[in-house]
Image (cartoon, rainbow, N blue to C red):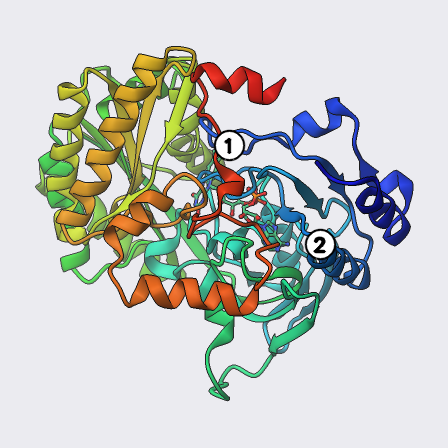
Amino acid sequence: MLTDRVLAGLAETTSPARVLTAREDLLTYASDATPLHRCVPEAVVIPRDTEQVARIVKLANEEGFALIPRGAGTGLSAGAVPTTDSVVMLFPSWNRIIEVDAVNHTAWVEPGVITADLHAAVEPYGLFYPPDPGSMRICTLGGNVAENAGGLRGLKYGVTKDYVMGLEAVLPTGEFLSLGGKSIKDVSGYNLLDLLVGSEGTLAIFTKILVRLVPKPQSTRTILASFDSVGAAGQTVTAILAAGIVPSTLEFLDQVTIRAVESFAGLGLPADLAALLLIEVDGRAHAVAEDADAVDRICRQQGAREVRTASNADEAEDLRAARRTSFTALARIGPTTILEDVAVPRSAVASMLVRIEDIAAEHQLQIGVFGHAGDGNLHPTCITDARDAEAVVRAEAALEEIFDAAVALGGTITGEHGVGLAKRKFLERHTGDPALRFMRQIKAVLDPSQVLNPGKVLGRSARCEHPPLGHPAYEEALA
Ligand SMILES: Cc1cc2nc3c(=O)[nH]c(=O)nc-3n(C[C@H](O)[C@H](O)[C@H](O)COP(=O)(O)OP(=O)(O)OC[C@H]3O[C@@H](n4cnc5c(N)ncnc54)[C@H](O)[C@@H]3O)c2cc1C
């Protein structure tokens, strides 16, 4: 329980209106987009500026409560889920794009800026911010940097860390830290930027972010190819890359996902299709036209049943709909959708898909798979019912086998969604010493009082043991 002194300190630092304690407000912040983790915070605080953030962090150190930074709450590893005796920190009005520098190709943004708003804001300058998580219309830059978010354009353009040039942040002790800048090259000292990007709200609270921009591609072509076998789709991915073409997007949908999308969006996709590939090439117009022709040819050579190329922007949006609606479509099949995330070397994508299919059959589960085939990042999505404890146990067992299979194939337990609460057990299992020890030491040095998002990533803290959804103690914990 937070003491009255803490609540008074939060109100004094910000204002009474910026501290929420009403039960209905707190319930809103009890979970993120991860369905099996939930915990009601003791309070929510909305700081106005960096100085207030620093003062709140110092108060947390003095009074011993946990702080949970939160963006839009779209996280898929329970990173923004509160822990007991915690205060959630929100940045809803920190949504200014402070500067777009068209000469240096950079933008300074506040952490609450919605990712798609940054895309739109830089476009009039002929510039482009490539990271495009599927949630880009709602998630924030602060959350993207904290999770090192990827997206559909990762194969050609990389992920969030490839675009962060500078950060202003408050450390877990309340000290202010400024890193990086507009200089493209900078090797002065250890690479602290890379340490903080992807630190999942456990090492720093970002208050300002400097991102790198690139020139907007002159032209884009969008192609949707359908296949009668997963193997043919996999060979097509290999053949496209072997031909020296690097598509900006190379996305895969399996049969379960295709059927769900068809029933949701009615795009005219045959129910017996085994796989779909969404392929986009971008760049200079003449090169794009050549690449698109080559992709079309390769798809047909590899036995595609149909290849559709969009002839204008509206048609391209229609073709993208199959991929963009995958999660929503799958979520309609059952009450609970667990959207997971594994990554394997590209050469192991086909084997990983076979393993997922076998594991789903073994556990009698419906698991749809879609994802970024070009960079080996797949999203096995398990449809279950969190009210049914036995079904949850089966789903968790299957997902555990999927994570182990990814690692056995030379991959990893998460390609872009992070560890948070959801995967800390697997991080421990698959990360050997001394790497795990280094991570714990870094956390201990930067956050000696364990105030910042404790128990996430490296969870040893008793502060974040929640009964899972479906467990009899769960309703009690929420009550
Ligand atoms: C439908 C859907 C599609 C998605 N598609 C993708 C995808 O393609 N690629 C991908 O990578 N992810 C994807 N995600 C996951 C999620 O959107 C990303 O992880 C995103 O970066 C989270 O941003 P957020 O603002 O919602 O952060 P939150 O969920 O609110 O927080 C995420 C983490 O960031 C920390 N955090 C937030 N703000 C700050 C701050 N200012 N300072 C320090 N730490 C902070 C939190 O403590 C937490 O650990 C998807 C999610 C959904 C629901």
Side of 218 relative to 297 (left or right): right
Q: Check the image and name the residue furthest to the top.
A: 388
Q: How many marks?
A: 2
Q: Nearer the viewer, residue 106 or 426?
A: 426
Q: Quadrant of the C terminus?
A: top right
User: Are the residues tagged 2 and 1 within 8 Å (C-beta)?
Assistant: no
Q: Which residue matches tag 1?
A: 33
In terms of sequence position, does the residue under pointer 2 or pointer 1 come before the other?
A: 1
Residue 60 percent location from the top left of the image: 71, 54
Three-letter code for the amino acid on which mark 2 is drawn = Ala
Side of 39 relative to 392 (left or right): right
Mark nearest the camera among 2 and 1 is: 2
Q: Quadrant of residue 123?
A: bottom right
Give me the disc on residue 74: none
Q: Quadrant of residue 82?
A: top right
Residue 473 percent location from the top left of the image: 49, 18
Three-letter code for the amino acid on which mark 1 is drawn = Ala
- Crowd around label 2: few <14 · some 14–19 · many ≥20 (10 Å): many
Q: Secondary structure at mark 1?
A: loop
Q: Secondary structure at mark 2?
A: helix
When the figure is inspected, residue 31 is found, relative to residue 345, above or below; the finding is above
